[in-house]
Image: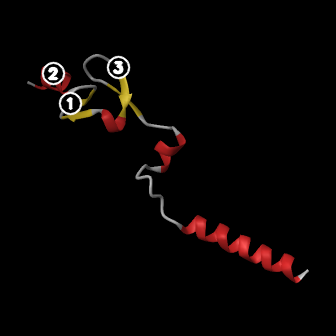
Amino acid sequence: MKYLVLLLIVLGGVWWIRQQRPNRSGKSSDQRQGTQNMVTCAHCGVHVPEHDAVHGHLGVYCSEAHRQRLET
């Protein structure tokens, strides 16, 4: 019986330590789960992930070429 209690304590400690470790993948929790915020290009209407979009004064764009075309 004392070995069972000891085993449960050890397993609980291992689980707790694993929960405390920081995320080393460098990805946010949204990216890890597969969800991303999508934005619409102000020039062509294509939907792109927010972290890939090019931000300009008049909105967001799918590429630098589309940003330059509308803002110059």
In this view, 32 is above or below 70: below
What residue is shown at x 59% (from left), y 65% (from top)? 18
**Circle 2 residues within 10 Å: few <14, some 14–19, many ≥20:** some
Give the percent coordinates (x, y) of residue 51.
34, 38
What residue is shown at x 50% (from left), y 38% (from top)? 35
Q: Amino acid at mark 1?
A: Leu
Kindly indicate whether the residue at mark 1 contacts the one at mark 2 (C-beta within 8 angstroms): yes
Q: Amino acid at mark 2?
A: Leu
Q: Which mark is residue 46?
A: 3
What residue is shown at x 25% (from left), y 19% (from top)? 43
Q: CA distance from mark 2 to mark 1?
A: 8 Å
Give the percent coordinates (x, y) of residue 61.
26, 27
Q: Is residue 12 left or right of residue 4?
A: left
Residue at which label 2 appears: 70
Q: In this orientation, which residue lies closer to the viewer: 25 or 67? A: 25
What residue is shown at x 25% (from left), y 31% (from top)? 59
Residue at which label 1 appears: 58
- Report which quarter residue 50 is drawn in: top left
In this view, 46 is above or below 56: above
Residue lying farthest to the top in this orientation: 44
Q: In this orientation, which residue lies closer to the viewer: 40 or 58? A: 40
Q: Quadrant of the C terminus?
A: top left
Q: CA distance from mark 3 to mark 2?
A: 15 Å
Q: Amino acid at mark 3?
A: Val
